[in-house]
Structure formats: C-alpha cells, structure tokens
Image: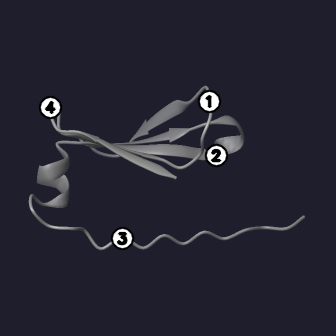
Amino acid sequence: MKISYDSEIEALYIRLVEGKHQCRTLQLTDEIALNFGENELLVGIEILDATEVLGAGSVPNVVLDISLMVV
C-alpha cells in the first residue's frame, strides 16, 4: 500500500495494489472515487479536497482490515 498527497491540488491517493492496471472508476461522492481493476479488485482510493474531507490538522482514525482467502 502506498499513500500519496499533492498539497497543490489537495488530492490524496491510496494505492492498494502496485503496478499498472486498467481501471474503472466508481464515484462515491464529488470528492471520493474508487478505482477497480480486473475482477473487481480495488486498486486505489482518491480523495479530492482532502483536508476538508478528512479534517485539516487532524489525523483520521483509519482501520485497515486485510482478509486473505486461501484457495
């Protein structure tokens, strides 16, 4: 996972899967979009106006739950 932030355009991107992927985008709100790759794999999350959405000067409470399925 890689998190990048561009302060000039107030954009935060959370990349969950490395590499190049052809994605379709699901727009949740005007500020939040999900990028899905092949087989509906969630590749990344984009947050525009990040300081407004997440709160300027505060650290959001983030819970990362990764479940692995063994076939």
Q: Which residue type carries mark 4?
A: Glu
The mark found on residue 8 in the picture is 4
Mark closer to the observer (4, 2): 4
Q: Assign the C terminus to one quadrant of the image.
A: bottom right
Residue 34 in the figure: left or right of residue 9: right
Q: Could you tell me which residue is drawn at 17 percent across and 31 percent down?
A: 9
Cα gap from disc 4 to disc 1, whole angstroms: 25 Å
Q: Quadrant of residue 30?
A: top left
* Quarter of the view holding residue 65: bottom right
- Residue 22 vertical position relative to residue 67 in the rendered view, above or below: above
Distance from disc 3 to disc 4, alpha carbons, whole Å, reads: 24 Å
**Which residue is under mark 2?**
41
> In the rendered image, which residue does mark 1 sit on?
21
Residue at image location 62% in from the left, 34% down from the top: 19
* Residue 56 placement, left or right of 54: left
Disc 3: which residue: 62
Residue type at numbered disc 2: Leu
Q: Are marks 4 and 2 in contact (CB under 8 Å)?
A: no
Q: Earlier in the sequence, mark 3 or mark 1?
A: 1
Marks 3 and 1 sit apart, C-alpha to C-alpha, by 25 Å
Q: CA distance from mark 1 to mark 2?
A: 10 Å
Who comes first in sequence, dot 4 or dot 1? Answer: 4
Mark 2 neighbour density, 10 Å: few (under 14) some (14–19) many (20 or more): few
